[in-house]
Image (cartoon, coloured by chain):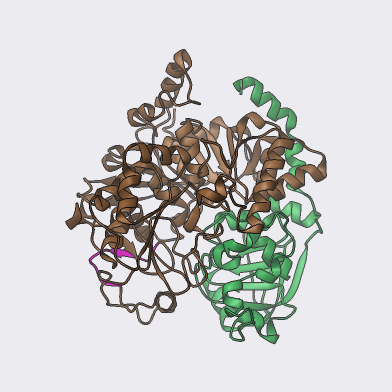
Chain colours: A green, B brown
């Protein structure tokens, strides 16, 4: 995985709360056996009309959304199904961070394993971002800070080990592999 | 010694390496359940890295999500109609064979929804850690197991190491007292709990359902409760194992036998939270005040008593968007709203007791004209039991469509879908936009309410039919 240190991008704003993983990638697109190519189906039921043409009202179909890597979404983003296809689709589309006031547990865990930063910030900063779609923001993963074009900046929590892996381009499996002796010892002690 | 919660006991017993500020815990996984939708990418990762499944003996595979439910497709008289689903099924068959994982294949008598078959086999046991690439893995917490959904990358981690990197979640006591009124079920109770704490109220927590009401529930009812923990944002929900749990497990094919059984029960009895154990959060629910519940919006927390009006929150953009999708208005009564489809099944309500409840309503009655009633058993074993008990005959006589087991219309990726704009009363777990098909409008309810609504062709209180 490519190391991530900083993101500098305009935002796309989707203010809806409780955007679930069925909206991010509907189940009918889960009949794939690889991770690739899901970006075209991202938010499919909101993004396309029933005849398959882009819905011009949907934010991702507007010119301002092009080249944005940061999605600002309403409270409790990524709730519901554990499908990792959701972060796969977001990353395949081009997003590198999701910013909200709450992000669902399994989605956040899956996102971190795919180079997609789940960034939880306070309601006031989030409110500013919702009111300023397209704002140019900077995310500094090493410093755990998100900076607004106003000059204001806020810190965000991120699990320490996942951050270490993202900053250094490491796969978490490598760490688990380094514990195989301890795992074998646990199995023999418990006779499992 | 400090009083410990059940969660704390199970967690500590599975710490291969405890967490530090820099690193998550390495948590041992006793049972890894897999299915066709979230496993292919994990197997591909193993293959690409030259890795193997470390403990195939602790790994169990089934086909449920994209698997069709019509007999002709299951038993090979015709090909699986959804081509991509057919490929996914074939992929799991090949992967299971290549990596030595036990698979309950298409025509296996033990096949079914992953969260139905593992308990009925006795593979799910108290005190275990259980994971699956599926958020409704929380179901197994009904046995006092720590069970949670994971993503496909983590499925790969468990394949390769039988462990996961996890931060310790917080604990949340859901205290439920009072007797459920006749016609009010475990499904109504969990919908009421989600309505109370909200769809993100459990985020970061493991819920423990406690109290006299919970202790009085059967194992199948407890599974319905724990199943929907994720709909409150909690990855896991747990219920202390007791005599009800042990009676359910005794004699099941994969439960311990003879002296091992006695040893196991003794250790399982020690799992319950110690008196005075502290939880990070709690809520008290009075079950005696509950009525049958039904959802009116597009998440499981948007729920009301069946004879209540839809909340009038005209200035709330979230509610407005949901009601626009559903074609409802604040202040309207839920009773009498039209129904096109009724789905009885899923890992939430697809077990024998759920089908018995549906049969209690449908016996001697018929489905209203224009309504499609689809009844899908949670497993092939549930199907056989329902047929042996005469339930399937009641369903067919009522005009219902009786199928082979699978996830079916819960998530509409297997050919079973609700049409755009149609209203479906569903015993499943999610009423998200489009969950059951593009444009489908889902109303979550109990098997009683679903069956009664099928009979009348409109949203109906089941209690007069009981």
Look at the image and say whether residue B304 sits in the magenta stretch. yes
Quadrant holding the N terminus of chain B? top left
Q: Position of residue A182 (x, y in %)?
A: 70, 29
> Looking at the image, can residue B413 be seen?
yes
Question: In which quadrant of the rendered view does residue B426 lie?
Answer: bottom left
Q: Position of residue B446 (x, y in %)?
A: 33, 54
Residue B415, compared with residue A173, is above or below; it is below
| Residue furthest to the top | B259
Q: Nearer the viewer, residue B131 or B359?
A: B359
Question: In which quadrant of the rendered view does residue B272 lie?
Answer: top left
> Looking at the image, can residue B39 be seen?
no
- Magenta region's main secondary structure? loop
Q: Position of residue B437 (x, y in %)?
A: 51, 66
| Residue range highlighted in magenta | B301-310
Q: Nearer the viewer, residue B265 or B23?
A: B265
Look at the image and say whether residue B60 sits in the magenta stretch. no
């Amino acid at each position: 995985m490519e190391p991530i240190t900083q993101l500098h991008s305009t935002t796309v704003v989707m203010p809806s709360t409780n955007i679930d993983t069925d909206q991010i990638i509907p189940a009918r697109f889960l009949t794939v056996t690889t991770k690739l190519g899901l970006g075209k189906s991202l938010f499919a039921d909101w993004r396309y009309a029933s005849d398959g043409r882009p819905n011009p009202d949907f934010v991702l179909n507007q010119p301002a959304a092009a080249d944005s890597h940061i999605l600002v979404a309403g409270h409790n983003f990524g709730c519901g199904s554990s499908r990792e296809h959701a972060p796969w689709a977001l990353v395949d589309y081009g997003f590198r961070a999701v910013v909200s006031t709450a992000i669902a547990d399994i989605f956040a865990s899956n996102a971190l394993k795919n180079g997609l930063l789940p960034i939880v910030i306070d309601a006031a900063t989030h409110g500013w971002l919702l009111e300023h779609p397209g704002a140019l923001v900077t995310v500094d993963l090493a410093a755990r800070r998100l900076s607004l074009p106003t000059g204001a900046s806020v810190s965000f929590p991120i699990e320490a080990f996942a951050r270490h892996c993202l900053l250094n381009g490491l796969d978490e499996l490598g760490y688990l592999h380094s514990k195989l002796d301890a795992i074998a010892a646990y199995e023999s002690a418990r006779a499992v | 010694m400090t009083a410990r919660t059940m969660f704390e006991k199970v967690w500590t017993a599975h710490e291969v390496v405890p967490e530090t500020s820099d690193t998550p815990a390495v948590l041992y996984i006793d049972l890894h359940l897999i299915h066709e939708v979230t496993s292919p990418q994990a197997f591909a990762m193993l293959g690409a890295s030259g890795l193997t499944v470390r403990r195939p003996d602790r790994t169990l595979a089934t086909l449920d999500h994209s698997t069709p439910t019509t007999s002709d497709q299951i038993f090979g008289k015709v090909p699986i109609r959804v081509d991509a689903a057919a490929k996914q099924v074939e992929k799991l068959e090949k992967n299971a064979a290549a990596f030595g994982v036990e698979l309950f294949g298409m025509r296996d008598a033990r096949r079914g929804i992953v969260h139905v078959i593992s308990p009925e086999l006795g593979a799910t046991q108290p005190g275990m850690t259980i994971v699956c690439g599926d958020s409704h893995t929380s179901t197994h917490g009904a046995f006092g197991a720590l069970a949670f959904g994971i993503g496909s990358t983590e499925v790969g981690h468990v394949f390769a190491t039988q462990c996961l990197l996890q931060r310790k979640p917080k604990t949340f006591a859901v205290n439920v007292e009072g007797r459920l009124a006749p016609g009010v079920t475990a499904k109504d109770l969990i919908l009421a709990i989600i309505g109370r704490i909200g769809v993100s109220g459990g985020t970061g927590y493991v819920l423990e359902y406690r109290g006299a009401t919970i202790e009085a529930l059967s194992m199948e009812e407890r599974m319905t409760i724990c199943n929907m923990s994720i709909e409150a944002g909690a990855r896991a929900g747990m219920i202390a194992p007791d005599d009800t749990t042990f009676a359910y497990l005794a004699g099941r094919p994969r439960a311990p036998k003879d002296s091992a059984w006695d040893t196991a029960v003794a250790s399982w009895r020690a799992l319950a939270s110690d008196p005075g154990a502290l939880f990070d959060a709690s809520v008290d629910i009075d079950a005696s005040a509950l009525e049958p519940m039904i959802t009116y919006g597009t998440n499981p927390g948007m729920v009301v008593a069946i004879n209540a009006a839809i909340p009038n929150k005209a200035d709330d953009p979230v509610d407005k968007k949901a009601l626009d999708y559903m074609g409802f208005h604040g202040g309207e009564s839920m009773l009498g709203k039209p129904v096109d489809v009724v789905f009885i099944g899923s890992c939430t309500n697809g077990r024998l007791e759920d089908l018995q409840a549906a049969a209690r309503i449908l016996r001697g009655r018929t489905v209203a004209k224009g309504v499609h009633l689809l009844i899908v058993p949670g497993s092939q074993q549930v199907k056989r039991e329902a047929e042996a008990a005469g339930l399937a005959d009641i369903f067919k006589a009522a005009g219902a469509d009786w199928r082979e087991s699978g996830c079916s219309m819960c998530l509409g990726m297997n050919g079973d879908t609700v049409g755009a704009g149609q209203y479906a009363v569903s015993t499943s777990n999610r009423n998200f936009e489009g969950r059951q098909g593009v444009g489908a409008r889902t109303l979550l309810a109990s098997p009683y309410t679903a069956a009664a609504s099928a009979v009348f062709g409109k949203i109906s209180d089941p209690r007069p039919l009981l």
